[in-house]
Image: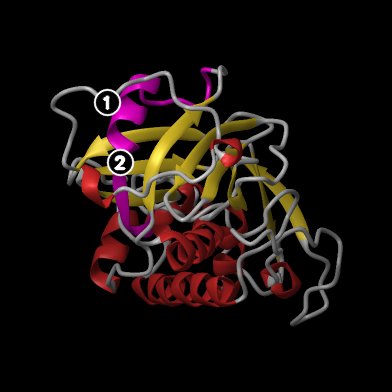
Amino acid sequence: MPELPEVETIARGLASRVTGDVIESIWLGRKPEPLKSPAAEIASTVENTRIATVRRVGKHIVFDLERVESAERRTPSSAKTHPPKSPHKETAGSATHAHWIIHLGMTGRLQVCDAQSEILKHTHAILKLSSGRELRFVDPRRFGRLSVARAGAFDATGMEPLDINLDRFSALFRRRKTPIKSALLNQKLLRGVGNIYADESLFRAGIRPRRSASAITRDQLAKLHAAVKEVLTEAIALGGSSISDYVNSDGEAGFFQLQHRVYGRESEPCLVCKTPIKRIVIAGRSSHYCPKCQK
């Protein structure tokens, strides 16, 4: 599942390509699973809006939308290049400003395509843009979700790990008796941190994933706080980790998987001390660590 760096990379790529474009219409597929909001509500909210920006909130991609007047809409030049028209008409009282929210799930992708390009199997949404291009949501396993919200009504739970200061970070774990790895994955505490980057952060901080969060000292939490920010920042710079299906908005793979020090390296020698990396399961999730470097 894409984690914070992958979602940030995709959001930045989309922002550079579609900001300022107008969504003229949307076609939604028949499968109900991807739709967290009703199809009619999605259509009436996103159609005839300008994409003001695209940003990441936790593991969500959020399109900030501005309503446009009819005079600003581009008149289509050729019906042959257009996606299927949405059967849903805009309803009275639609928001003048709103958010379109996408959670990619495990295999979701957002593609900016020429209107004439082949529509892939498992395409669940096609947005026709005034530039003549299309924005498509493709998700083979259908764990991704599409929803809308009025302006200011959406905010993911948890603290933003790239912005949180040390005092607030330490307070999140002070009285929690769960393993520190589980606490890092708790989206109600920190939003966007997933399995890969929790393992890598704990390794750099020298903390074993099964350690009780409440037993970790202030100095160790300071190291973990710095490690989380360092790992996420490096991963964003390298375009995320391409494990399984992940590619960015241009269809390109990330490179941070080449920098993994423990994740996915079971039985391989630690890059610091040569001790074989161990893999354990905590709350149903694989965890990788060095038994010598991490205490």
The type of residue carrying mark 1 is: Glu
Label drawn at residue 90: 1
State the residue in front, 213 or 261: 261
Dots 2 and 1: beta carbons under 8 Å? yes
Q: Residue furthest front?
A: 77
Q: Residue furthest right?
A: 268
Q: Is residue 269 above or below residue 193?
A: below
Q: Is residue 102 above or below residue 130?
A: above
Across and down, in percent, residue 277 comes to 78, 64
Across and down, in percent, residue 108 comes to 60, 41
User: What is the crowding at mark 2: few (fewer than 14 residues within 10 Å), some, or many (at least 20)?
Assistant: many
The residue that mark 2 highlights is 48
> Earlier along the polypeptide chain: callout 2 or callout 1?
2
State the residue in front, 262 or 136: 136
| 220 with respect to 121 (left or right) | left
Q: Is residue 272 magenta?
A: no
What colour-coding does the image apply? secondary structure
What's the CA distance linking mark 2 and mark 1?
9 Å
Magenta stretch in the rendered image: 32-57
Residue at x 51%, y 51% (from the top left corner): 132
Q: Is residue 295 visible?
A: no
